Amino acid sequence: MAYVNPQQILTVEDLTVSFDGFRAVDGLNLYIAPNECRVIIGPNGAGKTTVLDLICGRTRASGGTVLFKGRDLLKMREDQIVHAGVGRKFQTPSVYEDLTVLENLEISYPRGHSVWGALAFRRDGEVMDRIAEIARTIFLADALDEKAAFLSHGQKQWLEIGMLLIQDPELLMLDEPVAGMSVAERVKTAELLNRIVSDRSVIVIEHDMKFVADIATRVTVLHQGKLLAEGSMAHVQADPKVIDVYLGH
Amino acid sequence: MSLLSPSTEGRTGAFLNRTELAGTVVLALFIFVVLPLVLDPFRLNMFGKYLTYAFVAVGLVLCWGAGGILSLGQGVFFGLGGYALAMFLKLEASTPEATKIQSTPGIPDFMDWNQITQLPLWWQPFHSLGFSLVAVVAVPVFFAFVIGTAMFRRRVGGVYFSIITQAIAAILTILIIGQQGYTGGVNGITDLRTLKGWDIRPDGAKEVLYFVNAALLFVCLAIAQLIRRSKLGRLLIAMRDQEDRVRFSGYDVASLKIFIFCVGAAFAAIGGAMFTLQVGFMSPTFVGIVPSIEMVIFCAVGGRNSLIGAVWGTLLVNWAKTAFSETFPELWQFGLGALFIAVVLVFPNGLAGIWTTHVAPVLARLLARGESKSTTPAE
């Protein structure tokens, strides 16, 4: 079973979850290649967020397999999945509002995760350098001592992306990273994502088709928990089924 | 960037910032100097008793204030710690000579009254002071570990956790009262006399115990501050606000919660043991729902985000309780309830919050004005 295809970093096969008989995700297959940026689109309720929840362990699958570099994620706890190299950004910005930008990033720094590790954790030069580097990437270098509560919506989204980047995950999953952003912020975010995706695999859920066209390597269309279409942006946009359920009207 | 700007001050590794340091010094002066100087031995002992509750309040600042874990059952740990030491003291007081009028001499009096003729096996180790002192902390911490594991691993949190801890407090009280022959029942374990031959009842001994208690409280405050200053302290705040984000940043949230709950239990247990020593008995009245909730009120009034505030809150509420219940015994309970509602509705950060938002800015303005006045003639 644990066959590792070097062409795939993530192998999802026959993934199914049902909530009280309702199949939110139904027999889904998904193959993600290294350094690929996959965008998942689909109408509301198609099961997009649920797919991410299943991969990162937030929701338990009813059936199927999820292999990440040959490791079975369905048998692992959320924090173990993170340590394996999977990062997840939530739809609503989830940052620690009572802490500063610096502290937000520091908590996400991949060291000292146990109780004793957290007690003994020190902010040494290595940590501070990395935090400074990430802060520059996410346009927040001047806001390190600002409480996260005082950031704008867009800045909170960037901060959460930064909190994932500092972990350097091999697979990054982003749930609607530009939702609620101004046009200027969207442009900046697309630029940010384009830089990030160059050396890792990314799964993005997004509705903004212009943004999707900007970043996607391949596009997966979900409908009612099932795969509707998959391929390049042009291919998917030309697919009559996709136009019918999602793009057309 | 200026290294001296106030915002970067928070980044330095100082154990206490300037305000915290000043607050600690004032509190230490009050407890170690002012109270012993102005109070007679009876009142000093009473304040010593109040300070034992402050251990619980300090633990609650960590669990509830920082971590958002509201335990309404801290009396359980306070009581277990107190009972562990009371058992040792009771055994020391129950020498065959002192209890020769009993039908079975050499066992605690309440056992004799309940027709028990032999010291139960689980009481035996409490002949040893060393064992008892370890048990004071180990038993409540173990208990907290079991409760914490059962709750937090199953992701039970928020109100559900509070209600369950309250139920546990009720269960333990009922158990203690029901097992009268083994626990002393509703009267508790009373008539404690000596600690390794040292009589704990005279005024002189009580004064010594007051200082030991106060010193232990400051040790606990230091430990609590150490935790708050570490990344673990910031993680607790992060967990309170965005538990899922912490989990998906690679932390095992349950183990962090279990740890801090155990620390709170250990503090409460030390307070309980000091209570037994200073007051001379331990009873189920200090285990159940009412005392557990009162302890939360002490913490809330002082300010659940401030270690120093929690100690002040405990002293103030207890002092008020004594003062009012001596004059208006029927009204006190209503007063306490009203106080809690007022804290929750009007000043959620308690006394410490009032200090930082209302008193400190005024003080700073006055100080600044005073300084500018005194410097004007020099110019």
Image (tube, rainbow, N blue to C red):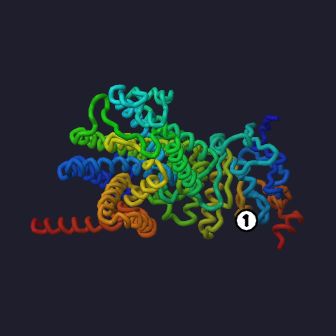
Out of B49 and B27, give the one closest to the viewer.
B49
Residue A67 lies left or right of residue B313; in this view the side is right
* Residue at the image point whose x is 22% and y is 68% from the top: B366
* Quarter location, residue B92: top left
Residue A11: x %, y % from top left: 78, 44
Residue B265 placement (x, y as % from top left): 46, 43
Secondary structure under the numbered disc 1 in the rendered image: loop
Residue A112 visible within the image: no
User: Picture coordinates of residue B373 (x, y %)?
Assistant: 15, 69
- Relative to A216, is B253 above or below? above
Look at 27% across and 39% down and name the residue there. B201
Q: Mark 1 lies on which chain?
A: A
Q: Quadrant of the C terminus of chain A?
A: bottom right
Q: In which quarter of the image is residue A10?
A: top right
Q: Mark 1 points at which residue?
A: A207
Q: Is residue A244 left or right of residue A10?
A: right
Q: Of B322 and B25, which appears nearest the observer?
A: B322
Binning the other alpha carbons within 10 Å of mark 1 as few (below 14), some (14 to 19) or many (20 upward) gives some
Q: What residue type is labelled 1?
A: His
Q: In this view, does B25 lie above or below A241?
A: above
Is A16 situated left or right of A168 in this image?
Answer: right
Q: Where is residue B241 in the image (x, y as percent from the top left)?
A: 54, 57
Identify which residue is drawn at 87% across, 68% down.
A244
